[in-house]
Amino acid sequence: MSVKVRFAPSPTGLLQVGNARIALVNWLFARKRGGAVLLRLDDTDRARSRAEYAAAIEADLTWLGLTWDEFARQSDRMDRYDLAAARLRESGRLYPCYETAEELEQKRKLQAARGRPPVYDRAALRLEEADRERLEAEGRRPHWRFKLEGGEVAWNDLVRGRQTFQAGSVSDPVLIREDGRPLYTLTSVVDDIELGVTHVMRGEDHVANTAAQVQLFQALDGDLPAFAHLPLLTDPQGRKLSKREEDLSLQALRADVGVEAMALNAYLAKLGTSDPIEVRHDLQALLADFDIGRFGRAAPKFDTDELLRLNARLLHETPFEAVSQRLSEMGLDDVDAAFWAAVRGNVERLADVRDWHAICRGEVEPMIGDDDAEFLVTAAGLLPAEPWDEETWGRWTGALKQETGRKGAKLFKPLRKALTGREHGPELRELLPVIGRARAVARLHGRRA
């Protein structure tokens, strides 16, 4: 069977890390099986859907490298939902209800007081035609519910195993609002049927929806897809991630935090499995051992600090060719392979290169202690002529040790503090050629250079 998955965000906000995880799992599942990926924008909520969010979704997925083969907007398919609703009405599975939100809430409170589950009582099915005409004459417009059939609803979930629901334990779902807008339960099923989706992989908050949607697939004579429901991400303390936390949007992680796309992909691909989270430099490397069956049912904890540590390890292994264009776009046109090799082991984010660029190519206030000034002047006098390479540092410090008798920290620390204005940083054997002789001499003499 040809595999086809869909990622179906609503353009009512920015993509968050939880959305990215679902998109990535769908992409990996399909690509490993030579299947297709559908990007579908669930934009029937016209009041909240915005073009800028739709554009941001596409930009975020492109950044992650999660390409798609087909694209659809639900707002372009309203006629298809109307036709499906008409079929359901004709078969007696879609019926009008006239209760207001307040009346439904009152019913739920009464049921709770009596110790009963808050299941809709199907009072609308007992209305006579005259009752409906009277209610509509009062200005009421119906919402439409899908009539669930009794008995057990079951499916074999690719993550959660066998799932069973008693249809009578849940309310008949609303498929169409009073204003005529079709809701997710209907639109999603119609699209999955007509666009040929074979596997539906989404968050476990949709499990209850699936119970109703299984019957809806059957009522519309559609092929039932396979389902996989992944547990939702939590923060390190086990609290549910809020969709309103803007610092967890992909835009913020990319632009403000400085996360690399493949660091996020590598992190999310293993989060919730027992596999180790390791650096991966491309999506093909993640495909090799991807298995939907590896995901457990426990809620995985998303830890930004852990992600940043992975981000740093990825950058430490990244060749210059992979970042040269981005460095140029940052205005660092004079950064070359030697510079990158010298500093990459000390960056957590690519933007950190700016700091080391300023140290190597800008002005630095040397840190010179009173006991080290004479030693540093001697060091300046022993600096060999250029050109320099990675062997220069060893030759220079060897001569300096022989001249002054200093060794260990007493030899190396004053040199680092004078040359970089910092107590820690990249290996000076790599950094010294990047700094250059003129700057080194000036800084060793205590001058800002």
Image (cartoon, rainbow, N blue to C red):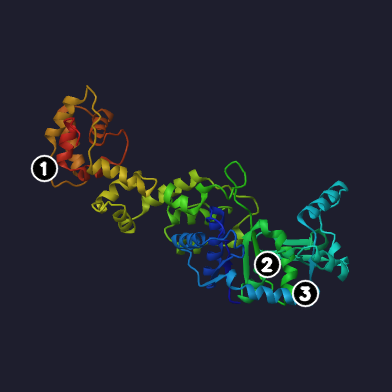
> Which label was assigned to residue 385?
1
User: How far apart are labels 1 and 2 at the CA level?
Assistant: 77 Å
* Residue 222 appears in view: no
Q: How many marks?
A: 3
Circle 3 sits on which residue? 89
Report the side of 281 relative to 41 (left or right).
left
Judging depth in this view, the residue of 315 and 210 nearest the camera is 210
Q: Nearer the viewer, mark 3 or mark 1?
A: 3
Vertical side of 352 occupied by 119: above or below: below
Q: Quadrant of the C terminus?
A: top left
Q: Please name the amino acid that badge 1 sits on.
A: Ala
User: How far apart are labels 3 and 1 at the CA level?
Assistant: 89 Å
Give the crowd class for mark 2: few <14, some 14-19, many >=20 residues within 10 Å. many
Q: Please name the amino acid that badge 2 sits on.
A: Pro
Give the crowd class for mark 3: few <14, some 14-19, many >=20 residues within 10 Å. some
Which of marks 2 and 1 precedes in the sequence? 2
Report the side of 96 relative to 433 (left or right).
right
Circle 2 sits on which residue? 182
Which of marks 1 and 3 precedes in the sequence? 3
> Which label was assigned to residue 56?
none
* Residue 370 appears in view: yes
**Element on which disc 1 rests:** loop
Judging depth in this view, the residue of 268 and 115 nearest the camera is 115
Q: Position of residue 433 (x, y in %)?
A: 20, 45
Report the side of 316 relative to 149 (left or right).
left
**Element on which disc 2 rests:** loop
Q: Position of residue 306 (x, y in %)?
A: 49, 45
Q: Position of residue 340 (x, y in %)?
A: 29, 50
Judging depth in this view, the residue of 183 and 342 nearest the camera is 183
